[in-house]
Image (cartoon, rainbow, N blue to C red):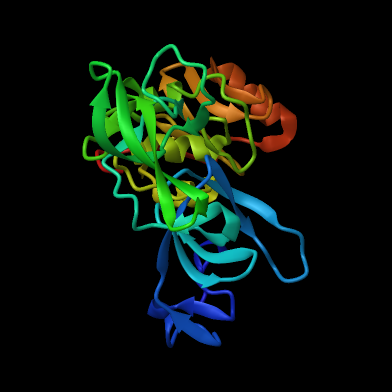
Amino acid sequence: MSIDRRLLKSNGRVAHVALRGQVAAAAFAEPVPLRVALPVAGLYSLPEGAPPRRERELVLHEVFEALEIGETWVFGAAARDGYVGYIRRAALAEAAPIRPTHVVAARQSYLAPVPVLKNSEEMLPISFGTALELGATHESGRWAEVAQLRAAPEGHKTSYTAYVPMAHLRPLAQAEADPVAVAERFLGVPYHWGGNSGFGIDCSGLVQAACLACAIPCPGDSDLQEAALGRTLPPDAALQRGDLLFWKGHVAWVAGPDLLLHANAHHMAVAREPLAAALARIEAQGDGQVTRRARLAPGG
């Protein structure tokens, strides 16, 4: 059975129970849902005898479906897209204490220990996409009381009370409407290979963040996105806002008829640039021509 390694929920020692009879493995297991308990956690490929290589990232409270829990590493897949790899065990916690109702919609926010605007307490930076369970509100609705998982719990206490600016949240049940508007919130965020957060992001991370916020299913890497997203446009079709352009190893949003928006190593940031100039620059630097032009339909 040929499955892309990034999507194959098996490492030879253990495989997802759904793969029984399809792959060889010493054991088959039902996934155990865990949640990330740090602001950002790396998802690594970890072949035997090789150093860890970061492939993607998960942010605070994202679900990781564990298949093998070792002393240092946990093998499994990100619930958002099925991307397979390893996360450090110290970055994960039991999923049950958190039942998210809202998500951070700003590119960055923070958790505070007290719901007071003018305070001198230490803040914990958190990213776009962080899922939170909303409780009471404070200071005339300015602050939302939320539960926060900790990677190193104190005794039996696995979640703690924190406070986040209410203006940075949206209800999980209310999807956004414009993926480009979501991507534009990341303007200026540093380019970070394999990044999936408001602290650092790459080209495919930017596309996935925008799509998932709009309830559009989206894989994690640009080649997977090229194969899965939208309908292919003919070469002479006029481009419009929300279209996607793909190159080998790169993807970008069309932000307008003559404007590109992408996370890229040239600017080392999420940036806008004129479309024609960007196409010429990308080809001149050796990355070739556009391999696919795609238009998303509602729902992907």
Q: Which residue is drawn at 40% across and 56% down?
A: 79
Depicted 187 relative to depicted 227: above or below: above
Q: Residue 34, how many percent across, how many down? A: 43, 59
In the orientation shown, which residue stands out farthest toward the front? 155
Q: Can residue 241 be seen in this view?
A: no
Between 27 and 95, the residue placed more toward the observer is 95
Q: Residue at x 54, y 25 (%)?
A: 122
Q: Residue 297, how many percent across, how many down? A: 27, 39
Q: Is residue 124 visible?
A: yes
Depicted 261 relative to depicted 78: above or below: above
Count the marks. Answer: 0
Between 165 and 84, the residue placed more toward the observer is 165
Depicted 67 relative to depicted 133: above or below: below
For the C terminus, the quadrant is: top left
Q: Residue 42, how many percent across, how many down? A: 60, 49
Q: In this view, does 209 lie to the left or right of 100?
A: right
Q: Residue 52, how many percent across, how many down? A: 71, 57
Q: Can you tell which quarter of the image residue 102 is in? A: top left
Between 31 and 159, the residue placed more toward the observer is 159
Between 102 and 281, the residue placed more toward the observer is 102
Q: Which residue is drawn at 42% across and 85% down?
A: 20
